[in-house]
Image (cartoon, coloured by chain):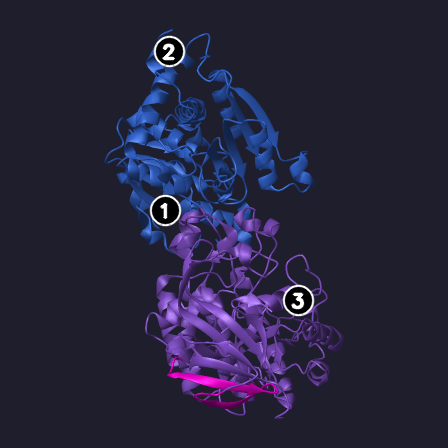
Amino acid sequence: MSEQRSTVVRGARILGGEPADILIRGGIVEEVGQGLTGDETIDARGLIALPGLVDLHTHLREPGREDAETVETGTRAAALGGYTAVHAMANTDPVADTAGVVEQVWRLGQEAGHCDVRPVGAVTVGLEGERLAELGAMADSAAQVRVFSDDGKCVSDAVLMRRALEYVKAFDGVIAQHAQEPRLTAGAQMNEGAVSGRLGLTGWPAVAEEAIIARDCLLAAHVGSRLHVCHVSTAGSVEIIRWAKSKGWDVTAEVTPHHLLLTDDLVEDSPVGAYNPIYKVNPPLRTRADVEALRLALADGTIDCVATDHAPHPVEDKETEWSAAAMGMIGLETALSVVHEAMVETGLLDWSGVAERMSYAPARIGRLAGHGRPVEAGAPANITLYDASARAGVDPSAFASRSRNTPYEGRTLPGRVVATLLRGRPTVLDGKLV
Amino acid sequence: MKRHLISAADLSRDDALLILDTADELAKISDRSIKKLPTLRGRTVVNLFFEDSTRTRISFEAAAKRLSADVINFSAKGSSVSKGESLKDTALTLEAMGADAVVIRHSASGAPHRLAGWVRGSVVNAGDGTHEHPTQALLDAFTMRRRLGPLDGRKVTIVGDVLHSRVARSNVLLLSTLGAEVTLVAPPTLLPVNVGSWPCEVSYDLDAMLPKSDVVMMLRVQRERMNAAFFPTEREYSRRYGLDRDRVARMHDDAIVMHPGPMNRGMEIAAEVADSPRSTIVEQVANGVTTRMAVLYLLLGGADLGGEIRQ
């Protein structure tokens, strides 16, 4: 080990604590202390050191929609956002429902090298919700899939959901459910409420999410399985998950950055005009009361983690009438800043709380070894250096993502990712890709 | 006035009264042998219709032509739109042709808002999805005012499929701006979930509302709605919410019956009610041209109207 070159990250405030030096050798944190020296030095004075962020919910779009994103561009965006690992969702074309496709995505991630890519496997063949995909083959593949999801679609059939929950127990998998009762959301365009009524857009009622979450919590309890709830968006969902956890059931949940900050009234009134599909997303933006409940739930641990649901779409799929537009927002490059504004500046989370919600918890849920470890001696050197004092307008033209569908354009957000280290190797330095 | 007319909420009380007063003036020339004014000579009005609506298109076309505008009718069928051209590209084409006003009818709620972001001319919403139809509300208000005088304190009951009705949304907004008291009557399935936040009252009981109403406006109800369980059968809908002769008998003598058309005779309105002296349905059509003239005139910056009419 000692003949390998070493790097010292100088003066970083680990989780916002007192400045310390981090000595890295062979991809591992060798020592944390004062006055350490190495072959190379990264000046991190004034910066906060966080464990490399882990995203449980990323759409990399490859294979199939390389016009929107590729593994290469999506993982560049991830690195710039401070991520060292992302879970690539299965709704590609072809769908990631076989060992072959998940291994392809995994290999593309290895080749890109900007962050680790852990593919998510589809629960059902072609996301059709009719028969189980070969979950075991995906789990045993080189990609070692542990998270399975039909995200974009709900596994709405109760029997199929039960079987999926049971089946993945054999390899410690988890079903990540996109909770959306399909009949209650036929043609749904935005949150059903006062705004949808005024705008004449078909509503996506909160109950369509909550009913599925309640059913799935009961199913998971009945068969003794692990359930993960994707992109929780309503106050009612929070109550149900809180209740399920109080029973001791193995239920985890994620919330997106946009659901922590944005509300459905932006569809009616925003600087970019009414009915601008930049705010069209699934599940939809909800009300201020929902945002408040989600923030509190993330603070108290009812919601375990933040996941971006980074969903790139080309310009032509957003520059349309509202009802014709694609659903989704990109989020990898703004996630940490949004959480900073919504959770840290409001006093709801400190930086160790951010580390738990954006690194430790998602790595735990995804059974992702080598990520989500504290910045301490012996841990893999996956580290994000963050300048919490920065403040800048969001400029989509500077994004590494191939798509530009961010809802934050023109908005000023706090903080800036200065550097990202993947097993000791900088993928981002001075805010730029290495 | 704002540059566009997309929602009835775009109109202040003064704006709305100015349009209605202007329409009153313009109505005078409809009685003349030569019905044309030179006001918009050299200006181009595009009728951009993505949804079939011959009635509304003809109404706007007549309005623009009576003001001497050049009118281009662009219907989505058989055009580049049916070959997959986007709304934005269509908008840029119209922009390149120098449209001063674009009258848009579209099946997607909010399409006029999007269009307004891509063209420099004025955008007039001629009906967007289940959102709004502001010129329909203006012609309805114009019709009511002609029959009943000023609308302050007048009681207007709007009956039917409010959930899917752009006419209802625009009427609620405009009539409340003009000081009328609006009550919506519908089965609960055909009301938006948060209708309580609208500037109007809500009732499920048509019979209770009839004696108090100065205006009863019936909305078209699509028969297909019963397939999505909004109501059980046509017959039950008609029994509970249809306006028949017996119900009309409970209205006071001066009260009027309105319908934006097209009607389902025998469903939401009985044929004899539609054809009765209380009914303003034919007047509404005639008033549509006059009101739309007023809108185009004011949006495109017409000068002193009195002078032009006297010429």
**Helix, strand or loop for the magenta stretch, by majority:** strand
Q: How many marks?
A: 3
| Mark 3, residue position | A72
To which chain does the residue with label 2 belong?
B
Residue ranking furthest to the right: A100
Which residue is depicted at the point 50% across and 20% down?
Answer: B43
* A33 or B306, nearer to the observer: A33
* A112 or B19, nearer to the observer: A112
Measure the C-alpha gap from mark 1 to mark 3: 57 Å
| Mark 1, residue position | B185
* Horizontal and vertical percent position of residue A409: 47, 54
Do discs 2 and 1 share a chain?
yes
Q: Is residue B298 visible?
A: yes
Which residue is depicted at the point 34% across and 17% down?
Answer: B25
Identify the element where label 1 is drawn.
Answer: strand
Amino acid under disc 1:
Val
Residue B309's label in the rendered image is 2
Do discs 3 and 2 share a chain?
no
